[in-house]
Image (cartoon, rainbow, N blue to C red):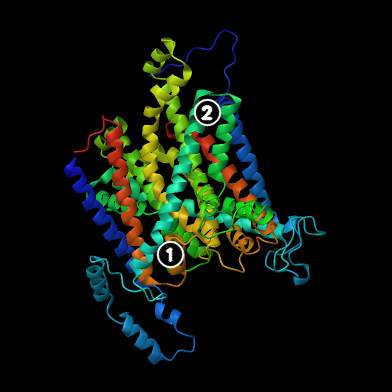
C-alpha cells in the first residue's frame, strides 16, 4: 500500500508538471499580455520597459526554466492585474470554492441516494419512472441556466434569497443547488443501476426468503454494496464540480477560485492562470488518490500493490 | 452460440428491418428524443422562413418588449432584437458546433486510439499518458484556457472543443481495440499476411463503430451545453454572431427587468440537450446495454 501511495504521488507530480508545461507553452505562443495592460497609445519604449520588467523579453526556454524553478518553490510570480503573489490570491479564494464544492457534493449525495434506492426498490412503477425522468432532465438542463432561473424566481420575484455573493447560509442555497444538479442526477442513475444489480444477487434473495422486512433488505444488506460504484464516481465527479464551479461562481458572483480564474483568462494574467492550473491539478489528483484509498478501505477485495 | 428457436407453425417470420423497427420503436423515450431533435433541426434550417426578423438587427424603440408583444412572440432584447429569431438562428450555431466537433474529435481520437491500442509500444504509452493528463483536468476549465489562448469565434471554438474532446474517443477506442485484437478473426487476418493498416480498417474499426456512435450522440448534447457555457463567460462565439450562450449572458445582465432574455434561450438549450440525450440513451439501450448507466 505504501508503494502504491508513493507511486500515485509521483504520478501526481508528473501530471501537475505536464499540465503546467502545456499551459505555459500555449500561453506564450499566442498573444502579448503586456499590450493588454498599457493604454493603446503607449509608446514602444514603455511597452519594452514593462516587458523587460516582467521578463517577457527573455527567450522562451529561459522563461520556462525560470518558471519551473520558481514553481517548485510555490512561487508563480505576481498577478499582472492585482500585483500580489498569484498563489496567495488563489489560496485566499480557495476556502470559498471548497465550501461551495463540498456542500454541492453533500447535497448531491443526500438527494441522489434516496432517489436511486427508491427507484430501484419500486422498479417499473410510477415512482421509478418519475425518478428516471427527473434524473434524465437533471442531466440535460444546463446548471448555470438553472442558477439564473433560480435567481429570477427566488431572488428577484419572491425576494427569499440573495442574488449573489457570499455571506450567510442563504447565499449558499442557490449556488449549491445549481452546482449539484447535474451531479445529483448522475449519482441517482448510478445508484439505481447499482441497487438493481445488488438486489438481483443470491444473498438478497436469501434475506427476503428468510422473511426480513424490505427496509432491512434494502438499507442493511444491499445499500452498502450498491454504494461502492458510487464512491468511484464521487472522485471522478469532483473534477466536474470544480469545473462547474467556474461557471456557477460567475453566475452568483461567488468569490472563489473559479471566478478569479475566469477574470485571469480574460485579462491574460499569466501568473494567475498558471497558479490556478497548478492548484486545480494538484487538488484533483490528491482527491482522486484519497477516493481510491477510501474505495480500498470500503471494499476489502481491492488491493493496491 | 445461441440458436434462434424455430418459428411456431403458422407464425410469420418478419423481415429483419421490421424486427429492428419493432425493437427500436418500443423505446418511447427515444422516439420522443427523435421528434425533438427533428423539430430543432427543421427549425434551424427554416429559421429564415419562420421569422421575418434578422437575429443581429433590432429597433431600439422596441427594446425589452415582454413576451406576447405584437409581432414578437417571445419578446425583444435590450437592442430591440427579436428573441425568437435569435433562438432560431442560434440553434444553427449550437447544432453546427456540436456536430462538427464530434466528427473531427471523433475522427482524430479514433485514429489515435486505433493505432495506440493495436500497435502498442511507445506510441501507446505517450498517447495514453497525454490522455490521462488531459482527462485529469476539468473539461470546461481546459476548454476555457484553450479558448482564451486561441481567441473567440466560431472556428476557434470548434478547435477548442476538438482539443478538449478527442481524448475521450482515444481512450474509448483503445480500450475496445485491446479486447478485439485478441479475437480469432484478427489472428486469422494476421496469419493470412494482411498488413496492420488493413486489419485495423477492415476488421477492427467496424467492430468499434457502435460504441463510438453511442458516445458521439451523447457527446453532442454535452458539447452544445459546453459551447453555451463558454460563450456565456465571454470566450466563445462573439457578437454579432448569435449563440444561446451569448443570449444567456445578456439575460443575466437584465435579470431584474427582463426575465425572458434568459428563460427562453435556456429552455431551447435544455430541450435540445434532452432530446439528444434521449436519442443517445436509446442507441445505447438498443445496441450496447453494457454501456447502460
Instruction: Point out the image quarter for the C terminus of chain A.
Output: top left
Q: Which mark is residue A261?
A: 1
Q: Is residue A164 left or right of residue B117?
A: right
Q: Is residue A8 above or below residue A271?
A: above
Residue A89 can be seen in this image: yes
Q: Residue furthest right?
A: B70
Residue B110 can be seen in this image: no
Q: Residue furthest left?
A: A3
- Residue ID at (61%, 55%): A151
Quarter-wise, where is residue B160 in the image? bottom left
Foreground residue among B172 and A303: A303
Foreground residue among A239 and B221: A239
Are discs 2 and 1 located on one and the same chain? yes
Q: Residue furthest top?
A: B9
User: How many numbered dots are placed on residues in this image?
Assistant: 2
Q: Position of residue A201 (x, y in %)?
A: 39, 19
Q: Position of residue B108 (x, y in %)?
A: 40, 53
Q: Is residue B262 left or right of residue A128?
A: right
Q: Is residue A79 above or below residue B224?
A: below
Q: Position of residue A95 (x, y in %)?
A: 40, 57
Chain hosting mark 2: A
Instruction: Point out the image quarter for the N terminus of chain A.
Output: top left
Q: Position of residue B267 (x, y in %)?
A: 64, 50
Q: CA distance from mark 2 to mark 1?
A: 39 Å
Chain hosting mark 1: A
Q: Is residue A102 above or below residue A81?
A: above
Upstream in the sequence, badge 2 or badge 1? 2
* Element at label 2: helix
| Disc 2 to disc 1: CB gap under 8 Å | no
Foreground residue among B3 and A154: A154
Q: Which mark is residue A119?
A: 2
Q: Is residue A272 left or right of residue A259?
A: left
Amino acid at each position: 500500500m505504501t508503494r502504491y501511495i508513493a507511486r500515485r504521488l509521483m504520478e501526481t507530480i508528473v501530471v501537475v508538471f505536464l499540465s503546467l508545461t502545456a499551459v505555459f507553452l500555449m500561453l506564450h505562443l499566442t498573444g502579448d499580455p503586456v499590450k493588454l495592460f498599457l493604454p493603446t497609445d503607449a509608446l514602444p519604449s514603455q511597452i519594452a520597459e514593462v516587458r523587460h520588467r516582467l521578463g517577457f523579453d527573455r527567450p522562451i526556454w529561459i522563461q520556462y526554466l525560470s518558471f519551473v524553478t520558481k514553481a517548485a518553490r510555490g512561487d508563480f510570480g505576481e498577478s499582472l492585474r492585482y500585483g500580489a503573489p498569484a498563489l496567495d490570491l488563489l489560496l485566499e479564494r480557495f476556502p470559498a470554492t471548497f465550501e461551495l464544492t463540498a456542500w454541492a457534493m453533500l447535497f448531491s449525495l443526500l438527494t441522489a441516494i434516496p432517489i436511486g434506492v427508491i427507484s430501484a426498490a419500486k422498479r417499473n412503477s410510477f415512482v421509478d419512472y418519475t425518478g428516471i425522468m427527473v434524473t434524465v432532465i437533471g442531466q440535460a438542463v444546463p446548471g448555470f441556466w438553472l442558477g439564473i432561473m433560480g435567481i429570477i424566481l427566488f431572488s428577484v420575484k419572491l425576494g427569499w434569497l440573495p442574488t449573489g455573493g457570499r455571506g450567510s447560509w442563504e447565499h449558499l442555497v442557490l449556488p449549491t443547488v445549481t452546482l449539484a444538479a447535474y451531479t445529483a442526477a448522475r449519482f441517482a442513475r448510478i445508484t439505481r443501476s447499482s441497487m438493481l444489480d445488488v438486489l438481483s444477487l443470491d444473498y438478497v434473495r436469501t434475506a427476503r426468503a428468510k422473511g426480513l422486512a424490505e427496509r432491512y433488505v434494502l438499507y442493511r444488506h444491499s445499500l452498502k454494496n450498491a454504494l461502492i460504484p458510487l464512491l468511484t464516481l464521487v472522485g471522478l465527479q469532483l473534477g466536474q464540480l470544480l469545473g462547474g464551479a467556474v461557471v456557477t461562481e460567475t453566475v452568483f458572483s461567488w468569490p472563489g477560485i473559479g471566478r478569479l480564474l475566469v477574470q485571469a483568462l480574460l485579462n491574460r494574467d499569466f501568473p494567475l492562470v498558471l497558479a490556478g492550473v497548478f492548484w486545480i491539478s494538484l487538488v484533483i489528483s490528491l482527491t482522486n488518490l484519497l477516493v481510491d484509498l477510501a474505495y480500498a478501505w470500503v471494499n476489502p477485495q481491492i488491493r493496491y500493490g | 452460440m445461441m440458436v434462434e428457436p424455430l418459428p411456431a407453425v403458422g407464425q410469420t417470420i418478419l423481415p429483419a428491418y421490421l424486427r429492428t423497427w419493432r425493437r427500436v420503436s418500443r423505446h418511447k423515450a427515444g422516439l420522443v428524443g427523435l421528434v425533438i431533435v427533428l423539430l430543432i433541426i427543421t427549425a434551424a434550417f427554416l429559421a429564415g422562413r419562420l421569422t421575418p426578423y434578422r437575429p443581429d438587427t433590432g429597433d431600439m424603440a422596441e427594446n425589452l418588449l415582454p413576451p406576447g408583444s405584437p409581432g414578437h412572440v417571445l419578446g425583444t432584447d435590450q437592442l430591440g432584437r427579436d428573441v425568437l429569431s435569435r433562438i432560431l438562428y442560434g440553434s444553427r450555431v449550437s447544432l453546427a458546433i456540436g456536430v462538427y466537433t464530434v466528427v473531427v474529435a471523433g475522427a482524430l481520437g479514433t485514429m489515435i486510439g486505433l493505432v495506440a491500442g493495436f500497435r502498442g509500444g511507445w506510441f501507446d504509452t505517450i498517447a495514453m499518458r497525454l490522455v490521462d493528463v488531459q482527462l485529469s483536468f476539468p473539461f470546461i476549465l481546459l476548454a476555457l484556457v484553450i479558448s482564451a489562448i486561441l481567441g473567440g469565434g466560431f472556428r476557434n471554438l470548434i478547435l477548442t472543443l476538438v482539443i478538449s474532446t478527442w481524448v475521450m474517443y482515444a481512450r474509448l477506442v483503445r480500450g475496445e481495440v485491446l479486447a478485439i485484437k485478441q479475437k480469432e478473426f484478427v489472428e486469422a487476418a494476421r496469419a493470412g499476411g494482411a498488413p496492420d493498416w488493413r486489419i485495423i480498417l477492415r476488421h477492427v474499426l467496424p467492430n468499434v463503430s457502435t460504441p463510438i456512435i453511442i458516445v458521439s450522440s451523447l457527446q453532442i448534447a454535452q458539447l452544445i451545453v459546453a459551447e453555451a457555457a463558454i460563450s456565456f463567460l465571454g470566450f466563445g462565439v462573439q457578437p454579432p454572431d448569435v449563440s444561446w450562450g451569448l443570449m444567456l449572458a445578456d439575460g443575466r445582465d437584465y435579470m431584474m427587468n427582463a426575465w425572458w432574455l434568459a428563460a427562453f434561450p435556456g429552455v431551447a438549450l435544455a430541450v435540445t440537450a434532452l432530446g439528444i440525450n434521449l436519442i443517445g440513451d436509446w442507441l445505447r439501450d438498443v445496441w450496447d446495454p453494457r454501456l447502460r448507466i
